[in-house]
Amino acid sequence: MTTTTRVAGFGTAYHRLTGAAAVSAVGDGMRFAALPLLSAALLHEAFQVSVVTAATTMPWLLFGLPAGAYADRFERQRLMVLADLLRAGTLIVTAVVLAAGLLTFWPLVAAAFLLGMGEVLFDCASFALLPGVVPKERLEAANGRLFAVQTVGRDLLGHVLGGVLFAAGRAVPLVLDALSFLASAALLRGVRGPRPDPPAGRRRLLGEIREGLEYVARDPLLRALTVSAGLINAVYLGQVAVFVILVRDVLELPPAAYGALVAAGAVGGVIGGAAASRISRAAGRVPTLLGGLVLIGAAGPAVAATGNVAVVAVAYGASGFALMLWNVVAVSLRQGLIPDRLLGRATGVYRLFAWGTMPLGALLFGMLTEAAGPRTAFAAGGAAILALALAVAPVLFRDGRARYDGRALATADED
């Protein structure tokens, strides 16, 4: 990738990215709250509800690697705009089908799948674009701010609005999310990051994908981060998929309360995103990463052990805080370790495992909830994360790059 000039601080391109993320995140939050409620209202079976949730992330298993390769081939900003337009069109069609009374199980699955396809393309391009539009020494702070903005929009404002607006009209959150994607596309048109280098010769897609896979596979620290993200996200989406069942059947709360409880996790996430860079500098990357895992793991049994709404809200908030700590530090570390020319493909590999496991988690937790109830699902997920913390600790402590900025190492490797 050829370089572009970046001004001091974060720069105009970063602020446009943040603005696009903010407006889209509010719409996404409404959809994330409304889609499980809509699925539960139309389908009535926990397993079918979990299938719809799983369909949103299934494209990471199918298209994560090719999307990463295309994010290294083409201008990343243009791919992000294309993904926004795909998702806006899907939501508009879904709202029309819903209004016509034809939105059954398979149309819901198809809509969720197309939304997931757009997400794959957008995320591979956006995570690869960010290090090209902010100074490398501010990458962790930039990620923290961006994640915090997304969390406020999606998990705080969006989830609350989604629950309320769903009660007013089932199609309303879908239509507003479509408008948010269109606004995001308009903002992104003004972003210019590094452009792809002209190809030295004929490039083969499979060869490019293999290069990204081999780069991640050879690096013990990248492997550990990738496997960890896979398990974390499988547990996270599995719990999200059945949380609506826990709120409805165990806590016996109305739909609007579901959005409010999920928003408690957003409050913790916002605090975690804002504080992640400071905590990482003060405590160190490794203690921050491991402390985040322990707190995520402890939140699962806390939710499972109580029927008290306040305790569930606090535990969900603590989980959101810890998850954001992990995400900001782990993603920034990964971006610093990988040369720009491989960022798209390495992101595709990372997300293949990190997000490709999410539908498996949703299906597994759906079956576990059917068999033993949502409390058991939350307790089992927490135990899995605590076991992960024990397993990954030796790798993090052994590799010095987890404690220091690896960007210079990656640049030297590229040269």
Image: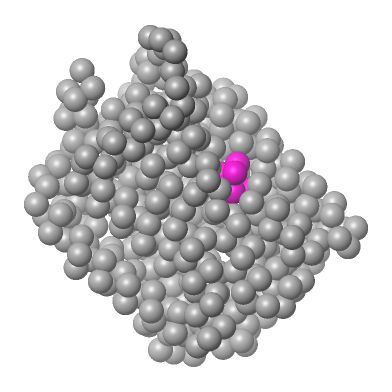
The percent coordinates of residue 214 (x first, y second) are 29, 36
Span highlighted in magenta in the image:
115-119
Relative to 50, residue 87 above or below? above
Q: Is residue 28 left or right of residue 279?
A: right
The percent coordinates of residue 396 (x first, y second) are 16, 53
The residue at the point 56 percent across, 29 percent down is: 79
The residue at the point 51 percent across, 54 percent down is: 152
Splitting the image into 4 quarters, where does residue 132 fall? top left
Magenta span: chief secondary structure: helix
The residue at the point 48 percent across, 42 percent down is: 64
The percent coordinates of residue 316 (x first, y second) are 44, 72
Relative to 298, residue 178 above or below? above
Quadrant placement of the C terminus: top left
Splitting the image into 4 quarters, where does residue 236 fall? bottom left
The percent coordinates of residue 78 (x first, y second) are 57, 25
Quadrant placement of the N terminus: top left
Q: Nearer the viewer, residue 389 or 352?
A: 352
Q: Is residue 245 magenta?
A: no
Q: Nearer the viewer, residue 337 or 11?
A: 337
Q: Is residue 267 in view from this perspective?
A: no
The residue at the point 60 percent across, 62 percent down is: 53
